[in-house]
Amino acid sequence: ELKVEQNPLFLSMQEGKNYTIYCNYSTTSDRLYWYRQDPGKSLESLFVLLSNGAVKQEGRLMASLDTKARLSTLHITAAVHDLSATYFCAARDDKIIFGKGTRLHILP
Amino acid sequence: AAGVIQSPRHLIKEKRETATLKCYPIPRHDTVYWYQQGPGQDPQFLISFYEKMQSDKGSIPDRFSAQQFSDYHSELNMSSLELGDSALYFCASSSRDIGYEQYFGPGTRLTVT
């Protein structure tokens, strides 16, 4: 059964710093998703990673996938306050399973 | 640009009633996903459709059913509503042509009293 673990679950960091969110999944998955959610709002898709070694970047966010280690990372470079949100990863076998989310709070 | 449309945006029902939520995907997207998010919870995948056929099935209760119609819109039918069904219901659309990236609707907030 596919399980997805995300860590850390809470992260408070200073603006300008770098940090990484980790997403481990337990069985073979053919897609790895990263989403952002602001309080009370819908989900926003950030990245979809399909193959081993895939790396995608958008602004200060970069996601990567290592299918052999069953690990995806979301790296935040030089964080800014606007990136404060909850970030979810999700993996797919024949259903999509979400991690518990990382609540990111960036201090000015 | 057209986005995913969900209706209604808010819905209040009583226990044991039925509800129908609708989702209109972005034009030319062939895949629709349904998610449920309870208060303070992480999203739960319910079900998805590709080209009007069910593709993946998640934690959708037997009391719920869904389908995708010939115009690609989808409906989530919920019967014998329970208090625990109170949640935000999101729909997303996607296509293989865009690398399976999902575009989400604003959600329907269902309150069961």
Image: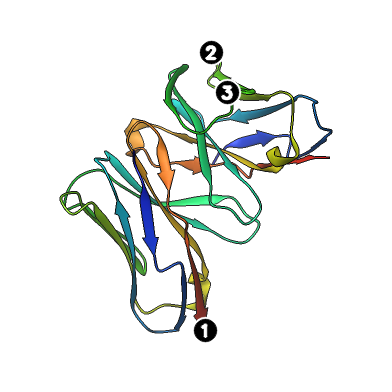
Judging from the image, mark 2 belongs to the subunit labelled B
Which label was assigned to residue B73?
3
Q: Do callouts 3 and 1 mark residues in contact (Cβ within 8 Å)?
A: no
Quadrant position of residue B67: top right
Amino acid on which the number 1 mark rests in the picture: Leu
Point 52% across, 84% down: residue: A107
Structural distance between the alpha carbons of marks 2 and 1: 49 Å
Which label was assigned to residue A107?
1
Residue A5 image offset from top left, x and y in percent: 37, 56
Judging from the image, mark 1 belongs to the subunit labelled A
> Are the residues under marks 2 and 3 on the same chain?
yes
**Circle 3 crowding by C-alpha within 10 Å: few under 14, some 14–19, many from 20:** many
Q: Which residue is mark 2?
A: B70
Quarter of the image containing the N terminus of chain A?
top left
Residue B15 vs A70, above or below: the answer is above
Point 43% across, 53% down: residue: A99
Residue A108 vs A98, above or below: the answer is below
Amino acid on which the number 3 mark rests in the picture: His
